[in-house]
Image (cartoon, grey):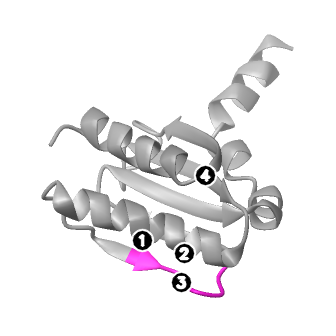
């Protein structure tokens, strides 16, 4: 399966199951561990686990074997490693605290410093 097709599946499942603020980060060239990171906000810890479970079920039905799952029931951050795509499901509090979008947008900060 192509990476773009996998991204579409992940985004659709998250959207269908009320994931909030779905963000896709293109990290090609920034890390060797994956091509894309998908971040989504859950309404609760239970919702975070459920969103990951829904994505896990759908990708397995499409012949993809996940590399791993971290976190679970009672976690405010659940990670699903699908190889070329890593899914981060976080509660609003965890997403605000860790600010992964900011962490992976280093290029923009460097560009701003060069312009000054």
Type of secondary structure dominating the magenta stretch: loop
- On the image, the x and y values in percent for residue 70 come to 48, 79
For the C terminus, the quadrant is top right
Residue occupied by mark 2 = 49
- The residue depicted at 73 percent of the width and 44 percent of the height is 102
| Mark-to-mark CA distance, 3 and 1 | 10 Å
Residue occupied by mark 4 = 18
Q: Is residue 98 left or right of residue 28?
A: right
Count residues near mark 4 (Cα–Cα under 10 Å), then give few for <14, some for 14-19, many for 20+.
some
Q: Is residue 14 left or right of residue 18?
A: left
For the N terminus, the quadrant is top left
Residue occupied by mark 1 = 53
Q: Circle 2 — which element? A: helix
- The residue depicted at 68 percent of the width and 76 percent of the height is 45
In the drawing, what numbered circle is on residue 109?
none
Q: Nearer the viewer, residue 90 or 102?
A: 90
- Above or below, 8 against 61 in this view is above
User: How many numbered dots are placed on residues in this image?
Assistant: 4
């Amino acid at each position: 399966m192509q990476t773009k097709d996998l991204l579409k599946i992940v985004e659709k499942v998250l959207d269908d199951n009320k994931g909030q603020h779905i963000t896709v980060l293109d990290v090609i060239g920034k890390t060797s561990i994956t091509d894309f990171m998908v971040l989504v906000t859950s309404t609760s810890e239970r919702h975070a686990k459920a969103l990951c479970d829904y994505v896990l079920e759908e990708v397995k039905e499409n012949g993809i074997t996940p590399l791993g799952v971290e976190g679970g029931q009672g976690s405010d951050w659940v990670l699903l490693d699908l190889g070329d795509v890593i899914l981060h499901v976080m509660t609003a509090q965890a997403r605000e605290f860790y600010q992964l979008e900011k962490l992976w947008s280093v290029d923009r900060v460097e560009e701003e410093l060069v312009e000054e």
